[in-house]
Image (tube, grey):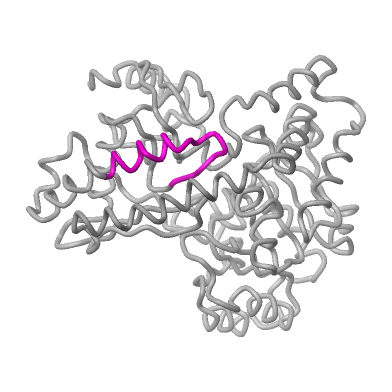
Amino acid sequence: MSLRYAKSEEFLERARKTIPLGAQTFSKSVTQYPFGVSPYFVSRGKGSKIWDVDGHQYIDFINGLCSVTLGYADPDVNAAVTAQLEDGSIFTLSHPLETEVAELLCEVVPSAEMVRFGKNGSDATAGAIRVARAFTGRDHVLVCGYHGWQDWYIGSTARNKGVPQATRDLTHGFTYNDLSALEKALTDHKGQVAAVIMEPMNVVAPTPGYLESVKALTHAAGALLVFDETITGFRYALGGAQELFGVIPDLTTLGKGIANGFPLSAVCGRGDVMREMEEVFFSFTMGGETLSLAAAKATIGKLKREPVIATMNERGSRILAEVPKLIDKHGIGHFASVSGHPTWSFLVFKDIDGTSAFEIKTLWMQEMMERGLLSFGSHNLSYSHSEADVDALLAAYEAIFPILRQAVDNRAIRQYLKCEPLEPLFRVR
């Protein structure tokens, strides 16, 4: 047992007796955090910091899997939720907040003419696909990126256990920034594709004209274009990546940052397509839950009122500018690189000289967490991240990169690890 993480490990042992993996989310479990060198349970969060159950403070660069855009326990969001709590959270009839937040989304998201709410990003993507199938009368779907846990998508990944083969046969992946891959998939399933759903950007930026061409090819094939902006919405720009890149999809799915971590997601898009939901069954008891809607109204209001996205861009641009210099300085460019958008960037490792990327990543995480920084490969910025937080990140890299180089160059990474290396969950980006 680790002395540093004794309470976390004790609680993990207790949790695994009643919860598979001991966590509700794969990305919060032992599949992502190496046992013996990781915290597993958090006690509280404030701003850019969280505290684990053993009392250690971390600067959090994961931020609730990109769902926290303003910062933990944002006072404006908390005040809105507290006020609504006095009036109740769920009712027999619809609440005005549902319309008010839908109107806000139609105001700020370029593609949004009508809106329906869910609770998770997976709700929204599954709803968008069902609507696209209803609108086109087709069954097949082309995917690029991560789109949630439900059968229609996860069946196309290595985590397809429990998904019927008939469902898996309807979803097909294509490679980002490769138009020929999309053209081939559309040709292979000519006249059968209901939707092309994609993250408009994740690890790398779209090449010039790529998204425009994706839209043109999709429409030429008689399919609908869906942008999964679960992460990029309210992060890349107020109106998401579609605003940033100027390419408007038919449907958009939103989640995570929409309510600064409160459980809310949305499907929005063209009115003629969205009206399919008057018959398509997309219905939740908690779809109009008002605490999350109050959080969304406060969050979007703050995003409009204050320089939230500009500040995240500024902090993140510094990371994207300085980390490559440190990679060059410490001579680890043969196995490490950085990419992505300033508000959601990635430190990427690759296999080298018999050492796997996951061994390198495990050592990096081990050293990061010892220094009080939480990340599993990305820099998910929030408005609450300060210049001092970025200073701390860069200082940690200054100290850790030489360790990584020594371990890789000496082919002795196992000697540096105080745990077993991570295993890949499944690759989607």
Q: Position of residue 113 (x, y in %)?
A: 86, 57
Quadrant into which the N terminus falls: top left
Q: Is residue 36 above or below residue 255?
A: above
Q: Is residue 333 above or below residue 186?
A: above
Residue 124 belongs to the span the image colors magenta: no
Q: Is residue 258 above or below residue 138?
A: above
In front: 138, or 291?
291
- Which span is picked out in magenta? 379-397
Q: Position of residue 233 (x, y in %)?
A: 65, 51
Side (left or right) of 280 relative to 167: right
Q: Is residue 399 above or below residue 84?
A: below
Image quarter for residue 68? Answer: top right
In front: 18, or 45?
45
Residue at 45%, 40% in the rendered image? 27
In front: 116, or 310?
310
Side (left or right) of 415 relative to 30: left
Image quarter for residue 80? Answer: top right
Q: Position of residue 205 (x, y in %)?
A: 51, 66
Instruction: Give the total of numbered labels.
Output: 0
Q: Position of residue 376 (x, y in %)?
A: 38, 43
Residue at 55%, 45% in the rendered image? 312
Residue at 74%, 70% in the rendered image? 224
- Extreme residue in the left direction: 410
Side (left or right) of 95 relative to 165: right
In front: 188, or 292?
292
Image quarter for residue 417? Answer: top left
Residue 390 belongs to the span the image colors magenta: yes
Side (left or right) of 162 relative to 363: right
